[in-house]
Each structure stands twice: as C-alpha cells, then as structure tokens.
Image (cartoon, grey):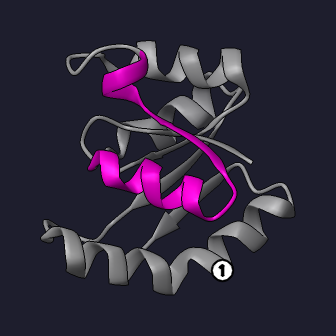
Amino acid sequence: MRFLVDTNLPPALATWLIARGQEARHAAVVLSPQADDRAIWAEAIATGAVVITKDSDYLDLAARVGGARVVLLRCGNLKLAPFRAWFEARWPTVEGLLDLGETALELR
C-alpha cells in the first residue's frame, strides 16, 4: 500500500511504514513543509496514496472531493515513543480495513 504522511506528523512515521513493507513518503519531503491540505490531497490522488494525518479537514476532502483515502489520527500530542506505541497497537486494524476498501478511518 502507498501512504502520504501529512506534515503535522513526524517523518519517522513514513520510515516506520517503509520498514513494514509499505510505500510511504512524508509530505514535507515530497511537496514542502508548508504544503496545504489541497496540495497534499492532490498528491495523494495523483499517486494513489492514503493520507495519514491529524487534521480533520481531510475527512471533508474525502467526502466532498474524493479520489483518495484518509486515516485520521486522534491521539493528541504525544512524544515519538508513545506515539509509535499508540500507532503500532492500531496498525493491524488499519491495514485490515484499508485492505477491505475503507476510504476514511478515524483512530482514537
């Protein structure tokens, strides 16, 4: 699966995904650290990527514009190690739901 990690998340998330056999890029590297939601969404559509973000505006883009999928993380502000543990615990479910074709996931 291909993922585009939003600028509001650590680049280490893209690295973590790659280590698990996924294709992942961080939006700050692909576009710019100041890339806005629409530019990131357009990149996701163009590359067939799932956007991983903490920005709820992407749920609206998924509903109104479509063309890409989104995983919205609702974990608050965590340091990297607790964030990684939080994400790892949820990853098998996320991967399974995306494999089933879900277009918008919200993780708590």
Q: Residues within 10 Å of mark 1 (few under 14, many from 20)?
A: few
Q: Position of residue 76 (x, y in %)?
A: 18, 68
For numbered disc 1, what is the local secondary structure?
A: helix
Q: Nearer the viewer, residue 97 or 65?
A: 97
Q: Quadrant of residue 3?
A: top right
Left or right: residue 38 versus residue 61 is left
Q: Position of residue 34 (x, y in %)?
A: 20, 17
Left or right: residue 21 versus residue 73 is right
Residue 16 is covered by the magenta coloring: yes
Q: Position of residue 19 (x, y in %)?
A: 56, 61
What residue is shown at x 62% (from left), y 21% (from top)? 65
Q: Position of residue 13 (x, y in %)?
A: 39, 55
Left or right: residue 91 versus residue 96 is left
Q: Name the residue furthest front.
A: 19
Which residue is under mark 1? 92
What residue is shown at x 69% (from left), y 58% (from top)? 21
Task: Please identify the dominant SS of the magenta region.
Answer: helix
Give the residue type that dot 1 points to: Pro
Query: Can the viewer see residue 10?
Result: yes
Question: Which span is picked out in magenta?
Answer: 10-30
What residue is shown at x 59% (from left), y 26% (from top)? 64
